[in-house]
Image (cartoon, rainbow, N blue to C red):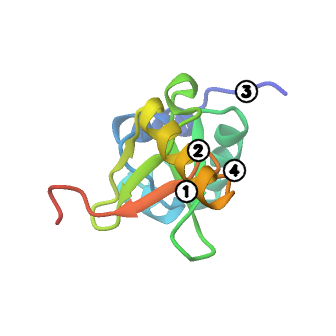
């Protein structure tokens, strides 16, 4: 299926790229952008396509039923764990070696295998 580079798609991608250290709900994205740039229904429709294209990563927000979305670079975001500040929302990418060490230790001690898209929650240095 052909992808069209509409004004709304460009505005959404620009917003996500310039805020790539954070994950947002659709509502937060729409509120942060100008209403002239994107509507909520358009944001949902475009976000589905961006996730399918591998440009955006979708994760569950905490223990809720809502999702957050974050711009990613496929090479940068595969095969490692993430940590997210529960106060400011900033997401950090853990080093591949550190991620492997954590995953292997957990698997060795509990036989539990952690998904590489797992997000560990806590507070960053600025927020604690």
Q: Is residue 73 above or below residue 35?
A: above
Residue identifier under label 4 = 45
3D distance between C-alphas at marks 4 and 2:
15 Å
**Residue 39, numbered label:** 1
Quadrant of the snapshot with the C terminus: bottom left
**Residue 79 percent across, percent down from the top left:** 58, 34
Quarter of the image where the N terminus is located: top right
The residue wearing badge 3 is 3
Disc 3, SS: loop
Question: Where does residue 28 sit, x and y in percent of width and height?
Answer: 43, 62
Spatial separation of the CA atoms under disc 4 and disc 3: 12 Å
Question: Mark 3, residues whose alpha carbon is within 10 Å: few (<14), some, or many (≥20)?
Answer: few
Q: Mark 1 or mark 4, which has the lower sequence index?
A: 1
Compare marks 3 and 1 and give the one earlier in the sequence.
3
Q: Give the label, 1 or 4, closer to the camera.
A: 4
Local crowd size for mark 1, using a 10 Å CA cut-off: few (<14), some (14–19), many (≥20): some
Could you give the CA–CA distance between mark 2 and mark 1, rounded to whole angstroms?
A: 20 Å
| Residue ranking furthest to the bottom | 64
| Element assignment for label 4 | helix
The residue to which callout 2 is attached is 57
Q: Mark 2 or 3 closer to N-term?
A: 3
Q: Residue at x 39, y 39 (%)?
A: 20
Disc 3 and disc 1: Cα gap in Å? 19 Å
Residue drawn at (65%, 49%), measured in percent from left and top? 115
Dot 4 or dot 2, earlier in sequence: 4
Q: Is residue 12 left or right of residue 59?
A: left
Above or below: residue 91 compared with residue 99: below
User: In terms of secondary structure, where does tag 1 sit?
Assistant: loop
Gap in Å between the C-alphas at discs 1 and 4? Answer: 10 Å
- Within 10 angstroms of label 2, few (less than 14), some, or many (20 or more) residues? many
Q: Is residue 12 visible?
A: no
């Amino acid at each position: 299926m052909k992808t069209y580079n509409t004004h709304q798609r460009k505005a959404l991608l620009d917003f996500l790229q310039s805020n790539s250290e954070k994950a947002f709900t659709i509502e937060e994205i729409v509120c942060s952008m100008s209403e002239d740039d994107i509507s909520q229904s358009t944001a949902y429709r475009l976000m589905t396509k961006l996730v399918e294209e591998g440009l955006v990563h979708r994760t569950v927000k905490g223990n809720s039923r809502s999702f957050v979305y974050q711009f990613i670079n496929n090479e940068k975001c595969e095969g490692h764990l993430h940590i997210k500040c529960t106060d400011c929302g900033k997401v950090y990418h853990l080093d591949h070696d550190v991620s492997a060490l954590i995953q292997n230790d957990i698997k060795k001690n509990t036989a539990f295998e952690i998904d590489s898209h797992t997000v560990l929650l806590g507070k960053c240095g600025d927020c604690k």
